[in-house]
Image (spheres, coloured by chain):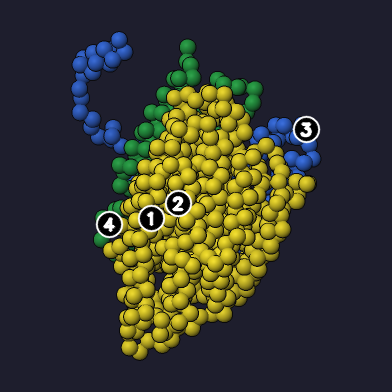
Chain colours: A green, B blue, C yellow
Amino acid sequence: MITLNHYLMLGGVLFVIGLFGALAKKNAIAVLMGIELMLNAVNINLAAFNRFLNPDKVVGLVFAIFVIVVAAVEVAVGLAIVINLYRQRLNTSVDEADWLKW
Amino acid sequence: MAWAALAVNWLLRPKRPQVGDQRETYECGLKTQGPTWVQFRIGYFLYALIFLLFDVETIFLYPWAVKFQVLGLFAFIEMLIFIGILILGLWYAWKEGGLEWL
Amino acid sequence: MPVWELLSVELLTAFLGLGLLVLGLLVPKGQKRGLGYLAALGLVGIAALAFALREAQGVVWEGYIIDPFGTYFKLLFLFAAILTCVSSFEYIGRLGNGEGEYYALIILSTLGMMILASAGELITLYLGLELMTISFCILATYRRGDMKSAEAGIKYIILGALSSAILLYGLSLLYGSTGSTLIKDISLVVNSGGVTPLMVVGMIFLLGGFAFKMAAVPFHMWAPDVYEGAPTPVTAFLSVASKAAAFAAFLRVFFVALGDSHPLWAEVIVALTILSVVVGNLVAIPQKNIKRLLAYSSISQAGYLLLGIVAFSTLGVGAILYHSMLYVFANMGAFMVATVFYNADKSDEIQDYAGLARRSPLLAAVMLFSLLSLAGIPPLAGFVSKFYLFMAVIDQGYIWLAILAVLMSMVSVYYYLQVVKVMYLGDPPPGRPAIEVPLGVQIALACSLAVLFLFGIYPTPLTNYAFSSAAAFFH
């Protein structure tokens, strides 16, 4: 029997993996991927809460849909900014290992 | 049990070095042409970005389409406004040359 | 009151933003200067409308609350946006790319802040927050071909997305532990004593996310880098408006929804306050770049504003409202001077401000009084607002906290006066002409100076407005 706790644990584990990816990776694309994982962990949480707490209302699912859309927008803008940075560091040929250091 | 079965398998299986094209990327039975790890043109990225946004935004159309009869005229007008804003975005991309093949 | 009228401010803002985007497509390149004037005029009109509707109270639906508290913040955002637009004409015109989009993005981020200030529901709150953050990410990278700007953009998008993800996880746990996303329903569950461990975890995540948007220590790391790299008008807008928006949303979520669990999170806020005030002020001392200096000063201002949250009273909320409004004018004044100076000299270094008083008395005077107001020197308005914040915490028995904040205020006088010293006592570099200030910016500078003096000497109208809004918030 799979209960709410199982879903929450899955969500929590996914969130931590994403957080680790976002903090430990050096490549900006990989960092964005980590953040996507965190958002998907949230989606799992929302869907599970909706299913187990009050299945009649769909608030959690609607929330998840909005999160998906916002995540897509965030990634689109993020990738555009990464490409902007990449172009400049190549053109100006600054030390290439520097371009993702913070 | 599962881990034990895997371990036994690993111990007992014959270990043959992979030779020839066994390690090649599989592509319809033919040998691949050139390196598969190449940089894509930036033009693809713009298309992908625009596609991604429109693809994800349509997520809002599905719930509305399913409940179209119930939601009535108000939701229909709201959806028209939403689609109008999306079309505005498409127009913007078009006008700024996002859809041209460089 | 009909829904249209309640929502008119937001609707007009959205319409103005999208309209500017369309106009930007229709107007041929090279003739886009007019879009900026149009944006500023439109915002002035919307601000007038918001002022006329300041007493409006009503519920559009359960998740979107129009009340004097929200409208106060909307006015604040609009003032900040107007000043930003006015100071951008010259700066953005020189960049030569995407003028139409620039103003559209400023207005859309203002819209996001308005939604944030009125949200009575978690999904709405999240959407407002993201609309604001993503618009700012694009604005921060606006100086194409400038490495600092590109780096500022990437830092802001990655850290911003990370913090929203953390905040969102908190929101999902809050939804899970109360079964609703409506702030009203959540507060009912919390009032009936239903604080679960899950909710406490959610609260911690929420605090982290909000503290990031406020740029409170230890979640401030992004602020100096992003502030330095972003175009100066954008930095100004980011430092005043997005901070105020984060405070508005924080007050709604933590005072209304989680108000009864106040003892659980009060200590954390005290820690954030102490850290922000101390670190912000001390690290500002060695700064050489005016934008970095103002960034650290804005971190310390976040600490002062947090005092009002520590107080957890009507007086505290009123003091936050009052201080954040004056902070808009003081900070925008300082940043407008920095923008004009950058347009003339292409530099943000404090040492290059030498002799500014002789090259442009107006700029130097505005910088002087803005900084003094930020430091809280009478008779400027910053003194009165800080006084209210300190009173609010003393009222609740945190005398030591008030003493610490006053001490750190004195430290801030030191680094603000260093800038003043350079401007007034330094010699201008030879061969540098006097700086010409465009007429629009002159008017904006004069307005913010007038506000600082007016509400320093005669604060009653604004305090009455702020405190009545705060009282309405607690109803």
Looking at the rendered image, the quarter that the C terminus of chain C falls into is top right
Query: Residue A84 at x, y = what percent?
Result: 41, 59
Going by the numbered disc 1, the residue's amino acid type is Val
Residue C390 image label: 2
**Is the residue under label 3 in contact with that under label 2 (CB below 8 Å)?**
no
Chain for numbered disc 3: B
| C458 in relation to A75, above or below | below
> Regarding mark 1 in the picture, which secondary structure is present there?
helix
Q: Using the image as rendered, state which of residue C56 and residue A56 is in the foreground.
A: C56
Q: Are marks 1 and 2 in contact (CB under 8 Å)?
A: yes
Please, which chain is the residue tagged with disc 2 on? C
- What separation in Å lies between label 1 and label 4 (alpha carbons)? 41 Å
Q: Which residue is mark 1?
A: C406
| Gap in angstroms between the C-alphas marked 3 and 4 | 57 Å
Q: As drawn, is C85 to the left or to the right of C13?
A: left
Q: Is residue A39 visible?
A: no
Count of numbered tags = 4
Q: CA distance from mark 1 to mark 2?
A: 8 Å
Chain at numbered mark 1: C
Pinpoint residue C282: horizontal percent, then vertical percent.
Answer: 30, 57
Name the residue located 54 percent from the left edge and 55 percent from the top edge.
Answer: C322
Which amino acid is tagged 4?
Answer: Asp
What residue is disc 3 on? B69
Mark 4, secondary structure of its residue: helix
Tag 1 and tag 3 share a subunit:
no
Q: Report the residue at 33% width, 42% height from top.
A: A23
In the picture of the structure, the residue carrying the numbered disc 4 is: A98
Q: Residue at x 34, y 56 (%)?
A: C407
Which residue is depicted at the point 25% across and 61% down?
A95
Horizontal placement of C23 versus C178: left or right? right
